[in-house]
Amino acid sequence: MAFWLMKSEPDEVSIDDLAQAPGQAVPWFGVRNYQARNFMRDDMRVGEQCFFYHSSCPEPGIAGIARVSREAFPDATQFDPKSVYFDPKASPDQPRWFNVEVQFLRKTRLLPLQEIRSFPELAQMRLLARGNRLSITPVTAAQWAFLLNQL
């Protein structure tokens, strides 16, 4: 079983939004990076857990825990001309972008990025790599366990 960190801008979908969504689940839409897409399409499986990370906000950090509740399926926003995520090169016959569905497990205390950076045990965490802007990154079992103890 793999573990993940998934970034969301809280003004688009926050941990509270996830907790209040029907079935407490939402598709992880709008990813337009091929590596992050490939993680969802090729690697993420139902039941795997992820840290729900608030990004692009005044205090970024881990805000909760979710799980993959549905494996990859085409991201509907790529087909909607009114969506900021519209992709004119995508078609229902040949979708370019995929998402998984994630389901709320629990809200945690906010574990700020600055605090995550302070732990030597997490020095190799992909989130902390220079230049990393991926919205979805794998988390090792050791990193997962360590972070759970901080929440």
Image (tube, grey):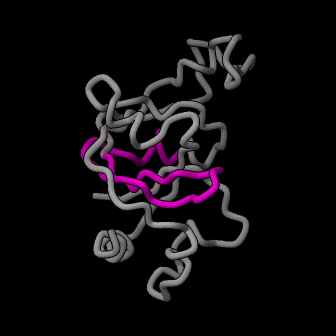
Quadrant of the image containing the C terminus = bottom left
Q: Residue 62: where, in percent of width, then height?
A: 45, 59
Q: Residue 2: within the magenta?
A: no
**Which residue is depicted at the point 60% across and 32% down?**
30
Instruction: Give whichever of 75, 123 is nearer the camera.
Output: 123
- What segment carries the magenta color? 38-66
Give above or below for 20 relative to 62.
above
Q: Quadrant of residue 134?
A: bottom right
State left or right for residue 84 relative to residue 39: right
**Which residue is depicted at the point 65% across and 50% down?**
56
Q: How many marks?
A: 0
Q: Residue 87: where, in percent of width, then height?
A: 71, 21
Q: Residue 5: where, in percent of width, then height?
A: 46, 56
**Residue placed farthest to the bottom in the image?**
120
Q: Residue 60: within the magenta?
A: yes
Q: Residue 70: where, in percent of width, then height?
A: 32, 32
Q: Quadrant of residue 72?
A: top left
Quadrant of the image containing the N terminus = bottom left
**Which residue is depicted at the point 56% across and 34% down?**
12
State left or right for residue 5 relative to residue 69: right
Give above or below for 69 relative to 66.
above
